[in-house]
Amino acid sequence: MSMQIFQSAKALAFVLITAIPSLAFGHGEEMHGNHDAKHGGFVMMFLEMHFELVVREEGGVQLYYSDPMRVDLPASVVADVTVEIEREGSATEPVPMMISMAGDFWEGESQSLKSENDIVRVGFLFQGEPFVLDIPAMVLPQFMDAPMPVVAESPHAGH
């Protein structure tokens, strides 16, 4: 197995292991939309809400939220959003987050990611429940072999 495949598999395993509690809360027998990236980012789930982390190649972070069927939710659906980037070989960079002018996502300015070993730490409150997740840069589109396409919504039931 090549080193790149091994690292990708290792990163995916890390994300799945750290996210199992939140994934378990979010996947029951109810109808459920897809996990396709609408904004070219990385999609995860907490309770019955999807969120998409977009780390722009030129720098900056965006967080989008949607319901179980992937209908967009306003940014105000969550509170106390915090993001920081733990950079390989240097200090952790806090990313001050605020709601976009249109109110549809959270955004913050940061330096661009330099290494697939950087970690993006995301935290927020949703329905009074705290959530924190470390997402390795190697699972983000700019570090994958092929970029993740931005796709049209196509909900499905179950998994």
Image (cartoon, rainbow, N blue to C red):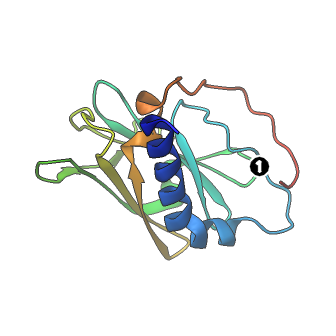
Q: Residue at x 57, y 28 (%)?
A: 148
**145 relative to 106 in the view: left or right:** right
Where, by quadrant of the figure, is residue 123 drawn? Answer: bottom left
Q: Is residue 105 visible?
A: no
Residue type pointed to by label 1: Met
Which quadrant holds the C terminus? bottom right
Horizontal and vertical percent position of residue 65: 57, 49
Q: Which residue is mark 1?
A: 69
Nearest the eye: 102 or 42: 42
Horizontal and vertical percent position of residue 103: 47, 42
**125 relative to 72 in the view: left or right:** left
Q: Is residue 82 visible?
A: yes
Q: Is residue 53 above or below residue 101?
A: below
Q: As drawn, which residue projects farthest toward the left?
A: 90
Q: Residue at x 20, y 47 (%)?
A: 88
Horizontal and vertical percent position of residue 41: 51, 36
**92 relative to 76 in the view: left or right:** left
Q: Is residue 32 above or below residue 99?
A: below
Q: How many marks?
A: 1
Horizontal and vertical percent position of residue 53: 47, 44
Q: Secondary structure at mark 1?
A: loop
Nearest the eye: 128 or 23: 23
Where, by quadrant of the figure, is residue 70 drawn? Answer: top right
Q: Residue at x 63, y 58 (%)?
A: 49
Q: As drawn, which residue projects farthest toward the bottom?
A: 128
